[in-house]
Structures are given as structure tokens and as C-alpha cells.
Amino acid sequence: MTPRRVNTESWPVRLLLCVLALGFLFFFLGLPLLSVFVEAFKQGFGPYFEALCDADTRSAITLTLVIAVMVLPLNILFGLSAAWAIARFDFRGKSLLITLIDLPFAVSPVVAGLLFILIFGRQGFLGDWLGAHDIKIIFALPGMVLATMFVTVPYIARELIPLMQAQGRDEEEAAVSLGASGLQMFWRVTLPNIKWGLLYGVILANARAMGEFGAVSVVSGHIRGMTNTLPLHVEILYNEYNSVGAFAAASVLALLALVTLVAKTIVEWRMAREIAMLSADLSIENPAVAAKS
Amino acid sequence: MSIEVKNISKRFGNFVALDDVSLEIPTGELVALLGPSGCGKTTLLRIIAGMESASAGTVMFHGEEATNVPTRERQVGFVFQHYALFRHMSVFENVAFGLRVKPRGERPSEKQIRERVMHLLSLVQLEWLADRYPSQLSGGQRQRIALARALAVEPKVLLLDEPFGALDTQVRKELRRWLRHLHDEMHIASVFVTHDQEEALEVADRVVVMNKGHIEQIGSPDEVYSAPATPFVYRFLGNVNVFRSRVHGTWAEIDRAPEPGSKDEALAFVRPHDIDIQREASADALAARIVHIQAIGPQVRVEVEHQGEIFEVDLTRERHEQLALAEGETVWLRPRALRVFQGEQLVDAQTFDLGAGI
């Protein structure tokens, strides 16, 4: 018999809360997601794949992937170094760094895009110099990479900082006392301990990088087949009343979201196990654990 | 290999963690750094390991300066309070780690690694756990694996930071004995940090008592217990009764409170088991009233009140039965051994006079 819980809400309250939550989820997430696919397949599979094979759509998909591939390694590098610095050392300006990492969350993406125009645009700080040396940043790939970098920078660092702080320095110091070099310590001890957290951050950053609209829109210039990412392309097609094309492109993004969700869930599950392992009470004798397995 | 620490100081901002500490540890000795938390003992251990840099002073390993040698070249085995086992590696891989990260030229073959690891695991009597992961082990098993891992690289010095601090009493006792045994077989210098006086007195060849960043006393377990060099050591190691007293010449008058601030003011320290209770008054005894009697294990603790202060007397069970004491009655306390301190200074006052007694 399950123990009767006394201090719980009565069943009508529970039912009401469940219906509210699930209803909200259905109307604001399930229904729109469903309608994307319904609209995309409205005229059957043929037109859907035709729309996807359109040269401009394909180049938009390619550009989106290229930007993600360029942005993610830089993000990993920055995320790791920032998390390492914050979790492992004390230095002046540490709290400032922690605050600044969150800045992209607080700033509207459009403002972020405008920032880059102000710096690299023709009338911007570096405009003359860039023009003189024939370097194009705004309305070109570098600008879009920069804008995407800006909006995705917090994800990996924010995932790693609490994880590395919780793990502490002990294992790394143990590795060093056993004769490991800095690189050996990183590959054999640090990285295996944070790999799930890192992957989690990468998944989130990737989803954001591929889906970013505002910041990229400002610096892209919307040149079809050249500087159009998938989200921008969806807008263009929709404004041209090409609803099948727009929703076909949108369905790719929606699919990406679903894949991200699944990947995120798997990684979350692995991370929860890792954290349980980490916080498994090391301080007291636990013969039950020792006897098991 | 011997360790020598010379005039080490360490500051964290304004906080002085270590203040001009010097210490010598010859090969083969097992030394305990004992002190309350925050006394700098762990900092000293970490400086010896090279995990913390000293603000001033030098560390010598076997007569060679090692102050600026990085940890990984110091050949120290370090055992952490919370074991710090690599949690994503099996027990076998944990112990093998130090061998696997050796430079290619010195790295043993896979077969040699296997033999060495299994030998170490049999040394700590845990061969059967080789394929387990740290999270599947009990605390005591983890600590033994951590030791095996530290010993794998054949360290010249073994450093242990509160090695048994997180274990329960039974396991702790067993591991202590086992560490002592292991140390005797290895012929290396070992240093362990502890705040548990019983642990230090039971395991170590020599005890270094620390307080507020400096060393109070270095000595054998017997020396630090029966002849404490400072009032702090007296209070930290075991129970002690403190009587106000005054000193003139080689005489210490117990229980004659001097005017505050006068230069003959002193304190007399007596262990509870160094006091005898008698029924008759005598020149060397103090009158006191029994407040409470309680049997604690092999001893009987008698709490007595003397001039508004409570003192403790530990009697053997035989003595207690002999005396047949009752709460509330007035008896006479006669100290068998005591030491008198003026401030931090030990006063050579062998003869004493219990002033107010007569």
C-alpha cells in the first residue's frame, strides 16, 4: 500500500492545474508546430521537396550550417576558458566577467546586430579602414558569424561554470601530483568530467545559432543565395506569398528543434547520472552501495 | 627522503596562514600535523606538495632546494581528504593513472602496469574491486584506493590531508593501524594532517602541534601529551584543569589569585587523571565540593566545585569504589603532577604550595 499523503491538494485542484498546463502547451506549442508541417505538406510531398531543393533554399541551409560550424568551435574555446578561469582561479574582475557573460541574454538581438554595424559598417568606427583594405564584414559572412557569436556566447560557459565549480580542483591536483602534465590532466581528467555539460551547452548554442533571426537579419543584407540564412529565408518566402516554400523551410527548422529536444533530453539524463555520481555521499561509509553490483 | 621546511610564511591577503614555520622530517618517520581548523596545517602540507606557493621561505627535499619545483616533478604521493578519485575511471585505471602519464621513455609496458597495479591492489587488500568505479565503493575502500594510487608512482614522500576525517569511527581505527603498518614497510617520510588528537597520538612517530599559523610544539606523542610546551598544547591535547596561581621564585602558589596584571600572575595546569581525591585535609590539597559523579568507560569522572569554578577529576574505578564518594560532600584535591605557565612561558616551579588550602 502506498502511504497516504495528507498535505496534498485535493483532486479537483490537481486536475485543474494539469489541464491548464497541458492545455497551454497544446495551444501555444503543439498546435503551431503541427500547423508548420500541415502547411508545408498542403500540396503534397512533391511540391514540398521541390521547395526544399530550390537553389536559394539550399544555399540558405548551407550558409546556416557554415555559420554554425564556424561559431561552435569558437564558442567551445571561449566557454572552456571562461569557465576554467572562473571556476579555478580568483582574479580581479571575476564577478564582472560573470555578469558580462550573461549580457547577450539581456540585450535585444537587434541591438546586438546594430552594434556590429556601428563598429564595422561603412559609417562605423572601423568603416574607413576596412573600406581601404577591401575587407567586407557587414552584409557578408564575417558579420553574420560575429552576430551569431554574440548571441550564443553564454550557453556553453554558463553550463560549465557551475559544473566545474561543483567538481572542484581535487581531481586535477591529484592528476598533477601523479605526474600528469597540464595537457594530460585536461584530456584525461578535466574533459571526461565535463563532457556531458559541454555537449549540453553545444546543443543549446547550436540550436540558437541556427535559429537566430534578429541579430543576423541586421547585419546580413538579405542577399538571396549569398547572405540569407534559413530563418531569414523563411521570412522572405513568406512575404512573397510562397507559403509552401516558407513552411517547407520552416519545417526544417522545426525538425532541428525536435532533434535538439531529443538530444537535450538524452544529455540531461546522462548529466543527472553524472551529478548523482558526483554528489554521491562520499563522506560516510555506505556498505549498501559497496555490496551492490 | 627527508623533508626540510625553512622559515615558511604564507599570507592570503591580510590573513597570515603560516608565520615563519620551520620543520624537519627525516626519512622513515611518520609525522602528524595537528591543530584546530584554520591553524595552517593543510596549507603547510600543500606547500610541501607544491600545490600552494609560500610567500617566503624554502622547502628542501633531501638537502636539495625544491621551493620552485612544480608538483608533478616533486615525486610526492598526495592523499586527499575526499579521496579525489577519478570518478569516470575504474579502480584499476585510477591506480594505473600515474604510470600511464609517464613520458614515453619511462612508461612501463601494459603487462608491467597490470602487474604493478594488481600488486598495489593486493597491498591494500582490494584486488577484487579492480573493475568497480569509485561511486560503487565505501568511504574506507575509496581511501585505500586513493593510497594505492598515490603509491603507484613510488613517491619519495607521502602526504595525507585529513585522510580519515570523513570516515566513521570503526573504519577510521582500522585504517589508522593499517596506515602505520604500510608506512613501516615503505621507508619513506610521511606527513599527515589531522585535527583529531587521538589519531595523531596513536599513529605518529612525532606530532607537530600547530596553532594560528605557527608551531606550538614538536615532540613524540608522549612528550606533547605529558609535557606540553604551551598552554595551548595543554588545552588542545586532552582535558585539563586550570588553576589561577602566583609565582615567586621557584614557588608557585596555587589558588592564590594575584591582583590582575601583576607580574607574578600565573596559571597551573593539571590533567584530570593527575588529581587524587582524599578525605583528609593536607598542606598540599585543596578543599572542594563534589557536584556530580559519572562513570565513563573505564574511568569515573568526578566534577568538583572549588571557589565557584568547576574542575574535573578522573579516578580509576577501583579508587572510586575505595573512596565511596557521594555528591554534595566536601573532599580534598591533591594534584600529582602539574605545570605552571606565566603567559606563554613555562615556569620551572617544581615545588608548589596550595596557598588557600591551609
Image (cartoon, coloured by chain):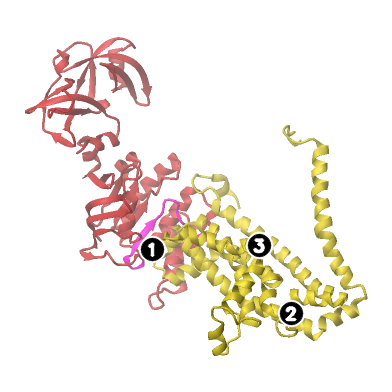
Chain colours: A yellow, B red
Q: Nearer the viewer, mark 3 or mark 2?
A: 2
Compared to B258, does A155 lie above or below? Answer: below
**Callout 2 amino acid:** Ile
Mark pair 1, 2: CA separation? 49 Å
Compared to B132, does B324 lie above or below? Answer: above
Q: Quadrant of the N terminus of chain B?
A: bottom left
Rendering coords of residue A209 (x, y %): 66, 71
Compared to A250, does A66 lie above or below? Answer: below
**Callout 3 amino acid:** Val
Q: Provide the residue span drawn in magenta.
A: B72-86
Residue furthest left as drawn: B249
Q: Which mark is residue A177?
A: 1
Give whichever of discs 1 and 2 has the lower sequence position.
Answer: 2
Q: Which mark is residue A127?
A: none
Q: Quadrant of residue B246?
A: top left
Q: Is residue A118 magenta?
A: no
Rendering coords of residue A292 (x, y %): 60, 50
Q: Which mark is residue A267?
A: 3
Do we see residue B149 in this rendering? Answer: yes
